[in-house]
Image: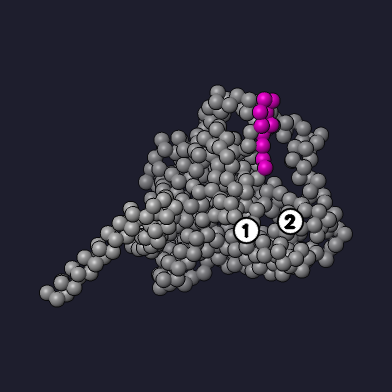
Amino acid sequence: MRAAASSERSDVAAAGSVGLWAAAVAVVPGGAAKLLVAGPAVLIATAWWAASKAHRWLTLFFISLLLTPPFPGPIGDAGLHVGPVFVVLGILIGTGRMCGWDRRIPPVAVAMCAFMAVLLLSVGFAALYSGPTIAMGSFFRVGLFGIGVYVFLYAASGPRDPGWHPLPFTRTLFLIATASALFACVDFYYQFPAPAGFEQQFVWLPDEVLRRAQGLFYEASTLGNFCAFFLVMIAVAFFRPREESPCSRTVLVLAGAVFTTALILSYSRASVLNVVTAIIALAVVRGVRFWKPVLLAALVLAAAALAIRFALPAFSASYWARISASFQYFGYSPDGVLSGRLQHWSALADFLTRNPWHVFFGVGYKTLPYSNFTGEAVIADNTYLSLLVETGVIGLISFLVLNLTILRSSLRAVRSRHSFFGEWIFCFWTGQMVQMLSGDLITYWRVLPVYFWVLGIAVRENESRR
């Protein structure tokens, strides 16, 4: 009786506290003051909800990554983002559930940590050659890459709730991603004011100048790469039985049209090459006739191209003219087709030729766009060359080992248990390695955690069979 009375008094006290808080929110004048009073309660409730299940924080994290823009801030050139806040929450949840972690260390985790160690080592050279301010920016960018590493570790070896299965979670992630791509299409059509820190990327049409589709991301290439990732998922899912696919075929087709449209509007040719390479890899892995996946991709592309042709005829003409010119004039003006990349690559090659000792340890991770140490600030637009100059041979080798380990682990998951996630990440990462020739893709920290989560699930499924 005493226990029941004590419990009843606690419930009454809790209800009274909630009532007082609600009354305070109602009484306080002004919207800002109401948010200030209600904010702690919302944050506590959100943290409690996320901590009650092992993977709920990932849902909040992916929503923040894909559906919220960067905000103006004094740190960095791309603004501030809410995503890292949920990573802190995820680290706390992972620490609190330490007994649920798998003690086995997958080879991909070793390769990732080795690569991160090299990046951290290069921060010292950034401080030596470019000064403490640029070195601090280098350090923060290593930390942003580390977010994806933690998500991989959590997916591959972290705690799980009883009965949890990755396919329903993938369905939620897929719908979140579709909403993000759909917003990018609407954003391009109406040209909403760009979020903080957006990249200056435009499409010059005869009658107007349009900002390339970037959606809620920092720049258009990230959107293109992100769309390529989920288009590969759709292609993989189409060759699966219904029970092994996260969504129905109707949903896959409709979402595929959205992702294809956003990919075209991003104006990213390299992302298209990524998808083509991934589809070839899918045909090889599954041993199917090449025309089947190509026909599927062609039908979705035709539907999206037709929609853009009627909605934005000037842009459609410009886009296909650009694609045609890429093939027609590559032999005459390769640097023009590659948007000036050859000139940047030549400048970096000349720097290494004049200063060969920098080949060993580099000049500091992510210093080239912000420092004049090499003669002028340069955007390498090539992951491999950028790592060679910034982290040296040791950094490039560790990155190549990481890539080979990703491909090997995902392919092993496909062969051992015909893993949906293994097939997805293997095909996409094959295309990703090709796209890295024209962009610094490891700096896309807003989307890398999503890729590494899929990789982590594939590795976990394969390890669970041993």
Q: Where is residue 132 in the image (x, y as percent from the top left)?
A: 72, 67
> What amino acid is at disc 2?
Tyr
Q: In which quarter of the image is residue 19?
A: bottom left
Q: Where is residue 451 in the image (x, y as percent from the top left)?
A: 53, 53
Asked if residue 415 can be seen in this view, the reply is: no
Indicate yes or no whether the magenta region holds residue 195: no
- Disc 1 secondary structure class: loop
Q: Residues within 10 Å of mark 2 (few under 14, many from 20)?
A: some
Taking the view exactly as shown, the residue that stands out farthest to the bottom is 2
Asked if residue 253 can be seen in this view, the reply is: yes
3D distance between C-alphas at marks 1 and 2: 14 Å
User: Closer to the N terminus: mark 1 or mark 2?
Assistant: 1
Q: Where is residue 443 in the image (x, y as percent from the top left)?
A: 63, 54
Residue at x 79%, y 40% (from the top left corner): 335
Query: Which residue position is annotated with label 2?
Result: 370
| Range drawn in magenta | 200-209
Indicate yes or no whether the magenta region holds residue 205: yes
User: For the residues carrying marks 1 and 2, which lies nearer the camera in this image?
Assistant: 1
Q: Is the magenta stretch mostly helix, strand or loop?
A: loop
From the viewer's perspective, tell me whether residue 344 is left or right of residue 57.
right
Q: Is residue 381 above or below residue 389?
A: above
> What amino acid is at disc 1?
Ile
Q: Using the image as rendered, state which of residue 296 and residue 441 is in the foreground.
A: 441
Residue at x 46%, y 42% (from the top left corner): 179
Query: Which residue position is annotated with label 1?
Result: 75
Q: How crowded is mark 1: few (under 14 residues within 10 Å), some or many (20 or more)?
A: few
Q: In this view, does 367 lie above or below 276?
A: below
